[in-house]
Image (tube, rainbow, N blue to C red):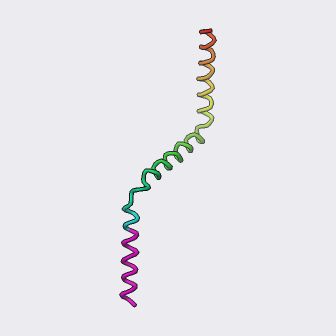
Amino acid sequence: MNRKKNWKENKLVQEWNAFWKQEEGVGTIEIVLLLVVLIGLVIIFKTQITKLLENIFKEIESQSKEVY
């Protein structure tokens, strides 16, 4: 019985190590983490971003009126 238990434990350790060595999903995880960070930054700086964009569009509108 002890031998069977050791075999199962070794197999579990091997599977665990193989799981951590896989790099197939690393790119996806990186993209998801970047999106989470970007969304967090947008939420934190929402008012500042809104004010900045409003000022930019006001400037564009005023300069476009000068052209026409």
State the residue lying farthest toward the bottom. 1
Q: Is residue 18 left or right of residue 54?
A: left
Instruction: Give the tally of numbered discs.
Output: 0
- What secondary structure is the magenta-colored segment mainly? helix
Q: Position of residue 65 (x, y in %)?
A: 63, 11
State the residue lying farthest toward the front. 24
Instruction: Reply above or below: 38 against 12.
Output: above
Q: Position of residue 5 (x, y in %)?
A: 40, 85
The residue nearer to you, when weighing 57 against 21, is 21
Q: Quadrant of the C terminus?
A: top right
Give residue 67's quadrant in the image. Answer: top right
Give residue 23's quadrant in the image. Answer: bottom left
Q: Is residue 58 left or right of residue 2?
A: right
Q: Position of residue 32 (x, y in %)?
A: 50, 49
The residue nearer to you, when weighing 50 against 3, is 3
Residue bounds of the magenta highlight: 1-16
Residue at point 55%, 41% (across, down) = 41
Q: Position of residue 46 (x, y in %)?
A: 61, 37
Q: Is residue 63 magenta?
A: no
Residue at point 39%, 70% (across, down) = 15
Q: Is residue 12 magenta?
A: yes
Give residue 56's quadrant in the image. Answer: top right
Q: Quadrant of the N terminus?
A: bottom left
Residue at point 38%, 89% (across, down) = 2
Instruction: Reply above or below: 18 against 28.
Output: below
